[in-house]
């Protein structure tokens, strides 16, 4: 699927300047329909300037009008150098299909609930999410939190079982190392206290005689 240049900025422009449905805009920009609703409600894309797909020759004005008159129609992007480069860059980055991309928050929520030992960086690598999304779900501040349901990322096809097992094993090794370090520090602290107590007793022999 070929996406427009700067999909979110394009979606913002389409929301502000057309009568297209949320679904039409979402499908054209490779986003979730709820994200488009979030843009319309002013909750998503704050601070991002809209990008006109007509002036950058990725969408014809007649195409927008055609789809405004038929909510079942899908916008057709103009295939040009800019859109081809966008498509190629997505392939290089292992572009995740929309059907799986919208499952990422569910997978993140599942990992946070079932494997709290995993670091945010590990979760991000496993399901291809972002730090902001993970933080939002962990703190329950994500714009779509009410609709996020925990689902196993392996079952969703976002990662392999072996990848999850390796991440869990690495997290366990990190936990063990941290525990050993803590125990070592506690032993050192106890030894220092004992040494200080012994030095104090030696400095006050009279108290021992009493």
Image (cartoon, rainbow, N blue to C red):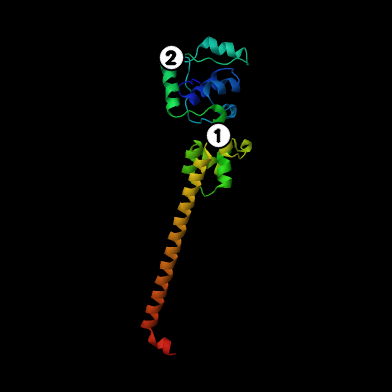
Examine the image and state in which quarter residue 187 appears.
bottom left
The answer to whether marks 2 and 1 mark residues whose Cβ atoms lie closer than 8 Å is no
Using the image, determine if residue 117 lies above or below residue 94: below
Q: Which dot marks residue 14?
A: none
Examine the image and state in which quarter residue 5 appears.
top left
Residue 24 visible in the displayed image: yes
Q: Residue at x 38, y 84 (%)?
A: 204
Residue 51, x across and y down, in percent: 47, 21
- The residue nearer to you, when weighing 77 against 175, is 175
Query: Where the C terminus falls, by quadrant?
Result: bottom left
Q: What secondary structure is marked by label 1?
A: loop
Residue 47, x across and y down, in percent: 48, 30
74 lies left or right of 124: right
Q: Residue at x 37, y 78 (%)?
A: 199
- Name the residue beneath numbered marker 1: 157
- Name the residue beneath numbered marker 2: 80
Using the image, determine if residue 77 lies above or below residue 102: above
Q: Report crowding for label 2: few under 14, some 14 to 19, many 20 or more residues within 10 A (C-alpha).
A: few
Q: Report crowding for label 1: few under 14, some 14 to 19, many 20 or more residues within 10 A (C-alpha).
A: few
Residue 42 visible in the displayed image: no
68 lies left or right of 48: right
Rounded to the nearest whole Å, what is the CA distance between mark 2 and mark 1?
Answer: 32 Å
Residue at the front extreme of this rendering: 162
Q: Residue at x 42, y 72 (%)?
A: 193
Residue at the top extreme of this rendering: 62
Residue 74, x across and y down, in percent: 58, 16
Q: Earlier in the sequence, mark 2 or mark 1?
A: 2
Using the image, determine if residue 127 lies above or below residue 88: below
In this rendering, the label closer to the viewer, 2 or 1: 1
Q: What secondary structure is marked by label 2?
A: loop
Residue at the bottom extreme of this rendering: 210
Residue 170, x across and y down, in percent: 46, 48
């Amino acid at each position: 699927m070929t996406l427009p240049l700067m999909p979110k900025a394009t979606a913002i422009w389409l929301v502000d300047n057309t009568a297209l449905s949320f679904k039409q805009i979402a499908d054209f920009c490779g986003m979730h329909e709820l994200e488009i609703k979030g843009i319309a409600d002013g909750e998503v894309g704050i601070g991002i300037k809209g990008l006109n797909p007509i002036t950058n020759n990725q969408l014809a004005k007649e195409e927008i009008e055609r789809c405004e008159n038929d909510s079942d129609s899908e916008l057709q992007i103009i295939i040009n150098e800019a859109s081809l480069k966008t498509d190629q860059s997505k392939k290089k980055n292992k572009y995740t299909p929309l059907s799986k991309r919208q499952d990422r928050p569910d997978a993140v929520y599942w990992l946070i609930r079932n494997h709290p030992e995993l670091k945010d960086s590990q979760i991000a690598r496993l399901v291809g999410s972002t730090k902001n999304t993970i933080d939002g779900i962990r703190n329950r501040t994500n714009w779509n939190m009410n609709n996020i349901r925990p689902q196993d990322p392996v079952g969703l096809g976002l990662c392999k079982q072996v990848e999850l097992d390796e991440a869990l094993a690495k997290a366990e090794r990190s936990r063990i190392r941290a525990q050993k370090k803590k125990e070592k520090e506690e032993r050192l602290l106890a030894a220092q206290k004992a040494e200080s107590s012994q030095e104090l007793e030696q400095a006050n022999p009279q108290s021992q005689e009493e």
